[in-house]
Image (tube, rainbow, N blue to C red):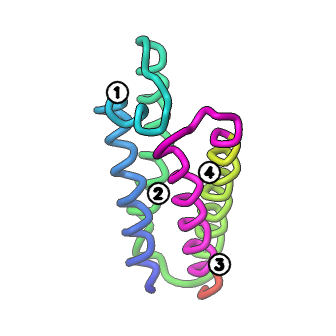
Amino acid sequence: MSNKTFLSLHGGIYLVFALALFFVPGLMWPMYGVAINDQYAYFLSQHTSIFLGGIAAVSLMLRDIEPGKVAKKLLTALVITNMLGVVITVYAGVKGIFVGFGWSDPAFFTLLSVLSYLQLKKQ
């Protein structure tokens, strides 16, 4: 797939999650087995959306990037970001923090890691 298509898809996915965790954390987190039981947990969810939204912005703003050195660095950073997502969400599942739908997160980050890696290899 082209960089434009890949980065549009990648940025769109991150944007959806950023908006959901900002506007409806009380709906989202319980599906993962995490309680939003006070104002601090609510705020931390909104705080997390800063980073998800930032990744979305970088992906979407750079979606017209041409294959080359800079594209390789961007895609390498996305591979690293998504792999961190795999490690952290597997940890949450193993520790019993994420239950139920929460096990979809490691699968989600693994898929994005693989797609990012495959896109990187095309550069």
> Is 64 colored magenta in this rendering?
no
Q: Residue at x 47, y 38 (%)?
A: 32
Q: Nearer the viewer, mark 3 or mark 1?
A: 1
How far apart are the two marked residues, 3 and 2, measured between alpha carbons? 16 Å
Residue type at the position of mark 3: Lys
Q: Nearer the viewer, mark 3 or mark 4?
A: 4
Q: Residue 116: give x, y in percent of width and height.
A: 57, 72
Please tell me which of labels 1 and 2 falls first in the chain: 1
Callouts 1 and 2 close, C-beta under 8 Å: no
**Tag shown at residue 58:** 2
Residue type at the position of mark 4: Gly
For disc 3, the neighbor class at 10 Å (few under 14, some 14 to 19, many from 20) is few
Residue type at the position of mark 2: Val
Callouts 3 and 4 close, C-beta under 8 Å: no
Please determine whether, in this image, residue 51 is positioned above or below residue 87.
above
Q: Which residues are magenta?
A: 92-120
Residue type at the position of mark 1: Gly
